[in-house]
Image (cartoon, rainbow, N blue to C red):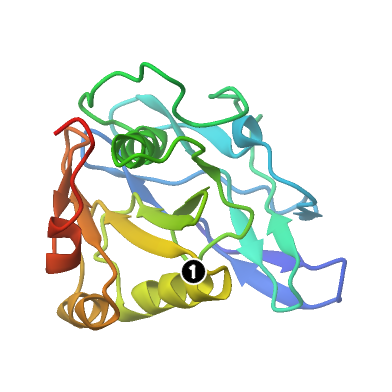
Amino acid sequence: MSESVPVHCPSCGREHRYAAPAYPCACGAPVAPSLDAAAPATPLAHRVWEDDWVTVRCAACGRAGAWPYPELGCPCGTVLRIPVAGPAARTASGGDLVPGGAAGPAPVRTALDIVMAAALYLHRLGHRDIRRADRRPPSGIALAARGLLAQVDPSARPAALRDVECLWLTAMTESAACLYFSLGGYTPAARARADLLAVPLFVLDRTGTPRPANAPADTLRPTDA
C-alpha cells in the first residue's frame, strides 16, 4: 500500500487520510499509484469510463498496467478523486464495457483486465448494458446493468463479510440482483453470509475465468455454455 496523504473534502470541510490500495502485477508484486500530496482532491460529478484508470509501472518488473484511479468516499456523500503523481491514461472507450462479438478470456495482467473479464462473463450471462456503476463500493469496482449490480475486487486480499453485506444492501436499495467477483477469494464469514443472503460468489483465476465459489453462483449458467 502506498504512503497515506491528507485529503480535504471541499463539500463539507472534513479532513481524511488516504492510501491507495495495491493490486497484484502479473509478476506478483503489489502495485499502487503514487499520490500527489500537494494537489487538492476534486469532487467527482459524473463518471466517464476512460477517465477511471491510471497507468502505473511496476517497480519490480517494469510492466505498465491500467489500475483504478484513486478515489475516496466522504461521509457527506461526495466522491473525491485523489491526484496521482503522473498523467491519467485513457485505456478504454466510453459506453458499454462489452460490445457485441466480445472475445474469450486471456491471461490477465492488470485490474482493468480483471474488470473486463468479469464484464465479459456478465455479458455471457445475458446482460447487454454493462457499465461502471455511479456509486463506488468500499473496495474494488462496481459494475451495473439493468436490474443487476456486480462488485469486482482485483486485489489479492480475500473479500470480507462487510464487502458482501455492503454489496447486498446497495443492491437492495436499488431493487437489483447482485454478484461478487474476487481475485483473492473470500473469508469463511463472507462465504457464510453470501450463502445466507443468496449472493453468488465467483473467484477469478489468472486466465480471467470466473469460477463459482458457492451454491448461488452454481445456479447461474452462461447463455453460450
Residue at (48, 64) in percent of width and height: 176
Q: Give the quarter of the figure containing the N terminus.
A: bottom left
Q: Is residue 132 left or right of residue 192?
A: right
Residue at (35, 24) in percent of width and height: 63
The residue where tag 1 is placed is 171
Residue at (41, 41) in percent of width and height: 127
Question: What kind of residue is marked 1?
Answer: Ala
Q: What is the total number of numbered labels drawn onto the structure image?
A: 1
Q: Give the quarter of the figure containing the C terminus.
A: top left
Secondary structure at numbered mark 1:
helix
Q: Nearer the viewer, residue 17 or 172?
A: 172
Q: State the image coordinates of residue 168 (x, y, percent, origin top left).
A: 42, 74
Q: Nearer the viewer, residue 21 or 183?
A: 183
Residue 69 falls in image quadrant: top right
Q: Nearer the viewer, residue 143 or 124?
A: 124
Vertical placement of 12 versus 6: above or below? below
Q: State the image coordinates of residue 170 (x, y, percent, origin top left).
A: 52, 72
Residue 177 falls in image quadrant: bottom left
Residue at (75, 76) in percent of width and height: 15
Q: State the image coordinates of residue 75 (x, y, percent, origin top left).
A: 70, 78
Vertical placement of 96 versus 176: above or below? above
Crowding at mark 1 (Cα within 10 Å: few <14, some 14-19, many 20+): some
Q: Is residue 198 left or right of residue 205?
A: right
